[in-house]
């Protein structure tokens, strides 16, 4: 390759790799949070692109014309965003579980700004999301996601048509399974809430003059926090196994 063509070819390879990895870095748990400066995410994405480009450069098509190049970059960005969306949906499993826990422990009205979802959320959901993000980083599962993005060059070759139907089907299945896992994590609190409201209903019938809600709410909160302390470690293990199994499904066998 002539020297005058070498530099544009390398820029083209890095640009394509940056499009896919950058799309993932926008949403990856722990790095793609709204409170993380965009500059840091960009630096990380560019650094990873410089490392990954020599590894996957042979899978990239030759530099096309300008309209085809724009289309190719757009497709690469969509693939990167797909992996970021999958990882974000898996993480938000705990936000759903937190909402269910809050409704069954008397904390549904205690709202706090959750930067992970950039809106108001429940206290249990905020707590679980922060613990889960920390556990993902400690368990190096963010490395697993980055490896899945690298292996995706064999699953989704650059320049090939986007499997839009497969993407939509996979995301819908992940959402359904995430809701199922969230209910399983929150199941002890659902049982606790059911039993507690049955007891409250019986007491309200036996002593109609007693303001049962004001008496029982502090007890419900304390019981909920106690149960949370008992099941927290198990819930995190279930989540980490669920996250790793879903991301690991995109890895190619060595």
Image (tube, rainbow, N blue to C red):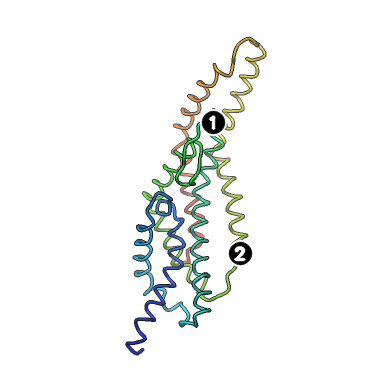
Q: Quadrant of the N terminus?
A: bottom left
- Per the image, label 1 sits on a secondary structure element best described as loop
Q: Quadrant of the C terminus?
A: bottom left
> Mark 1 and 2 residues: CB-CB less than 8 Å, in contact?
no
**x 64%, y 22%: residue:** 198
Residue carrying label 2: 166
Q: Which callout, 1 or 2, points at the residue further toward the start of the chain?
A: 1
**x 49%, y 72%: residue:** 73
C-alpha gap between disc 1 and disc 2: 39 Å
* Residue 121 pos. (x, y %): 51, 39
Residue carrying label 1: 109
**In this rendering, would 81 be left or right of 44?**
right
Q: Nearer the viewer, mark 1 or mark 2?
A: 1
In this rendering, the answer to whether 119 lies above or below 153 is above
**In this rendering, would 6 be left or right of 63?**
left
Callout 2: few (<14), some (14-19), or many (20+) C-alpha neighbours within 10 Å? few
- Per the image, label 2 sits on a secondary structure element best described as helix
């Amino acid at each position: 390759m002539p020297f005058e063509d070498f530099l544009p070819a390398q820029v083209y390879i890095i640009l394509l790799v940056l499009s896919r990895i950058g799309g993932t870095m926008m949403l990856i748990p722990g790095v793609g949070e709204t409170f993380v400066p965009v500059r840091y995410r960009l630096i990380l994405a560019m650094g990873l692109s410089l490392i990954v480009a020599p590894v996957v450069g042979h899978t990239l098509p030759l530099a096309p014309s300008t309209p085809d190049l724009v289309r190719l970059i757009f497709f690469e960005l969509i693939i990167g965003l797909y992996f970021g969306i999958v990882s974000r949906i898996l993480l938000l499993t705990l936000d759903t579980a937190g909402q269910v826990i809050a409704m069954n422990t008397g904390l549904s009205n205690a709202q706090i700004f959750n930067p992970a979802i950039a809106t108001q959320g429940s206290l249990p959901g905020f707590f679980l999301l922060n613990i889960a993000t920390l556990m993902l980083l400690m368990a190096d599962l963010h490395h697993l996601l980055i490896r899945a993005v690298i292996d995706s060059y064999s699953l989704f070759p650059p320049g090939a048509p986007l499997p839009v139907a497969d993407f939509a089907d996979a995301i819908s299945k992940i959402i359904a399974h995430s809701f199922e896992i969230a209910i399983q994590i929150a199941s002890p609190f659902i049982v606790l809430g059911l039993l507690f409201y049955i007891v409250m209903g019986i007491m309200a019938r036996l002593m109609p003059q007693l303001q049962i809600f004001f008496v029982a709410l502090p007890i419900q909160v304390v019981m909920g926090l106690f149960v949370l302390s008992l099941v927290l470690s198990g819930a995190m293990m279930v989540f980490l196994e669920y996250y790793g199994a879903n991301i690991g499904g995109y890895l190619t066998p060595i």
